[in-house]
Amino acid sequence: MKYKRALYFYIIFITGAAVAFGFGYMTRLLMDNAKSDQLTLVEEAYSILKNHAYDDLPEEPALEYGMIRGMLEAYGDPHTSFVEPVQHELYSDQLAGKYGGIGSSLEWQEWQL
């Protein structure tokens, strides 16, 4: 009787694990299909460019930034823009208000009597 109970427990455990694994696998397949449907045209265009381009392609970040700029241009909002990470860091440093020195300036002024 004790062994039957342990056997039932293991069967239920293995069945539950198999169902959970199957559910996760099917969910992943559905998510991958949904993702691939969204960017199929972009991936196809990139593949054609990569395989048939006359000159060498720019580095990956330059292509990604170009895609983002094109997407924002198609969006058409004049107040929405993309700033590359390097430029963003420079802008952030300028806006942070961290300046060295004592904050004074010298001017040449001629006195007339």
Image (cartoon, rainbow, N blue to C red):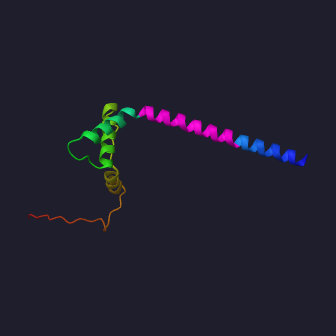
Q: Residue at x 64, y 41 (%)?
A: 21
* Front position in the image: 101 or 61: 61
9 is within the stretch colored magenta:
no
- Residue 95 in the image: x percent, y percent? 34, 54
Residue that lies at the very extreme toward the right in this rendered image: 1
**Which segment did they paint magenta?**
17-38
* Front position in the image: 68 or 33: 33
* Front position in the image: 6 or 36: 6
- Residue 71 in the image: x percent, y percent? 34, 35
- Residue 54 in the image: x percent, y percent? 20, 42
Q: Which residue is drawn at 27% across and 39% down?
A: 49
Q: Is the magenta stretch mostly helix, strand or loop?
A: helix
- Taking 105 as reference, is 57 above or below it? above
Question: Left of 86 or right of it: where is 34?
Answer: right
Q: Which residue is drawn at 32% across and 31% down?
A: 74
* Front position in the image: 93 or 37: 37
Question: Left of 95 or right of it: where is 58?
Answer: left
- Residue 70 in the image: x percent, y percent? 30, 36
- Taking 21 as reference, is 92 above or below it? below
Residue that lies at the very extreme toward the left in this rendered image: 113
